[in-house]
Image: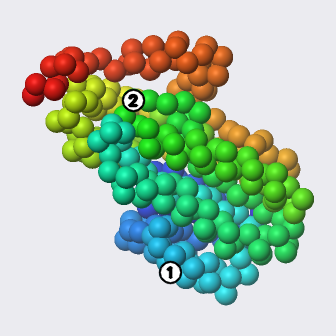
């Protein structure tokens, strides 16, 4: 793998940054892409090639692909990590916000993949790592649009695996659990803006509280754990189709699969304790 070329999206923080550092240690040529170029300065100092890219902008995606093709004739490894969580009651969420969630978490990475695939097919080799979530297999209250994108990514990845197998290209899905990143902080503000004063206010406040408790220091797994799993998968001669990693991922997905919807509903809602009833929330 010493001369392989990788592109990691969403590399300005969290899992993306940790993965980029790991792949640099593994000896790859690593391109790192994100909207916040200044947040990748440390990666550039380690030897990564930092490029500015908004995954939802066609011109940005095309420019990055052209630069990589010009300098290295494409990539051997693509890590589709760019993504975010948009929370709020489904009823309270504007469809434009829902569409943007899909643009970032699904359509943007799909377009990037489309542009990089021809070179992989020509070489009849390559590995595409899609960072999903345990949220691609389970669900939580007020996360309908986020979970919809991750469930979609899971199905998209499965179809892509079948389509690309004849060309020697592996599709690897990573399903992180609770990881100590910016995720918890990012979802709380918009969630309260959308639903903090609506009919779902009591639930919104309970979800924010539960999220804060979950992401307290030591509450989640390190992004480094995810990066190590990605490295392991890339080094495998025949990688698994999926890797669950991080706190809660395996037990929650197991419960969802084998215990049924009603039991899982109770498990999830037991972690969200509403201090007010929905009826009272309507009066506030």
Helix, strand or loop status at disc 1: helix
User: For the view shown, which residue lies furthest in the right direction?
Assistant: 166
Color style of the picture: rainbow
Q: Which mark is residue 141?
A: 2
Describe residue 227's horizontal placement relative to residue 121 as left or right: left
Which residue is painted at 44% across and 44% down in the image?
A: 145
In this rendering, is residue 79 above or below 214?
below
Q: Which mark is residue 59?
A: 1
Query: Which circle's residue, 1 or 2, is located before the other in the chain?
Result: 1
Describe residue 170's horizontal placement relative to residue 30 as left or right: right
Which residue is painted at 38% across and 47% down in the image?
A: 86
* Cα–Cα span, label 1 and label 2: 36 Å
Quarter holding the C terminus is top left
Helix, strand or loop status at disc 2: loop
Q: Say whether residue 56 is visible.
A: yes
- Image coordinates for residue 206, horizontal then vertical, percent: 27, 25
Check disc 1: other Cα within 10 Å, few if <14, some if 14-19, many if 20+.
few
In this rendering, is residue 42 above or below 122?
above
Quarter holding the N terminus is bottom right
In this rendering, is residue 280 above or below 173?
above
Q: Say whether residue 46 is visible.
A: no
Closer-to-camera residue (167/40) = 167
Which residue is painted at 60% across and 26% down in the image?
A: 253
Which residue is painted at 78% across and 70% down in the image?
A: 120
Closer-to-camera residue (71/275) = 275
User: For the view shown, which residue lies furthest in the bottom direction?
Assistant: 70
Closer-to-camera residue (91/210) = 91
Check disc 2: other Cα within 10 Å, few if <14, some if 14-19, many if 20+.
some
- Image coordinates for residue 205, horizontal then vertical, percent: 23, 29
């Amino acid at each position: 793998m010493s001369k392989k070329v990788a592109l990691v999206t969403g590399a300005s923080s969290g899992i993306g940054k940790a993965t980029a550092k790991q792949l640099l240690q593994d000896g790859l040529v690593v391109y790192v892409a994100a909207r916040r170029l200044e947040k990748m300065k440390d990666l550039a100092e380690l030897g990564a090639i930092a490029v500015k890219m908004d995954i939802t902008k066609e011109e940005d995606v095309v420019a990055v692909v052209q630069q990589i093709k010009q300098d290295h004739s494409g990539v051997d490894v693509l890590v589709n990590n760019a993504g975010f969580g948009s929370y709020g009651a489904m009823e309270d969420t504007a469809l434009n916000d829902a569409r943007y969630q899909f643009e970032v978490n699904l359509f943007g990475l799909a377009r990037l993949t489309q542009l990089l695939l021809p070179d992989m097919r020509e070489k009849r080799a390559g590995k595409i790592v899609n960072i999903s979530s345990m949220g691609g297999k389970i669900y939580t209250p007020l996360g309908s649009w986020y979970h919809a994108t991750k469930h979609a990514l899971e199905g998209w990845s499965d179809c892509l695996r079948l389509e690309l197998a004849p060309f020697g290209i592996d599709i690897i899905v990573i399903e992180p659990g609770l990881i100590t990143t910016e995720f918890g902080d990012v979802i709380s503000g918009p969630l309260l803006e959308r639903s903090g004063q609506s009919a779902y206010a009591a639930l919104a406040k309970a979800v924010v509280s539960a999220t804060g408790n979950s992401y307290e220091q030591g509450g989640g797994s390190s992004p480094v754990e995810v990066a190590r799993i990605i490295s392991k998968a890339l080094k495998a001669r025949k990688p698994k189709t999926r890797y669950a990693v991080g706190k809660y991922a395996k037990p929650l997905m197991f419960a969802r699969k084998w215990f049924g919807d009603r039991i899982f509903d109770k498990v999830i809602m037991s972690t969200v304790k509403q201090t007010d009833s929905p009826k009272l929330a309507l009066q506030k």
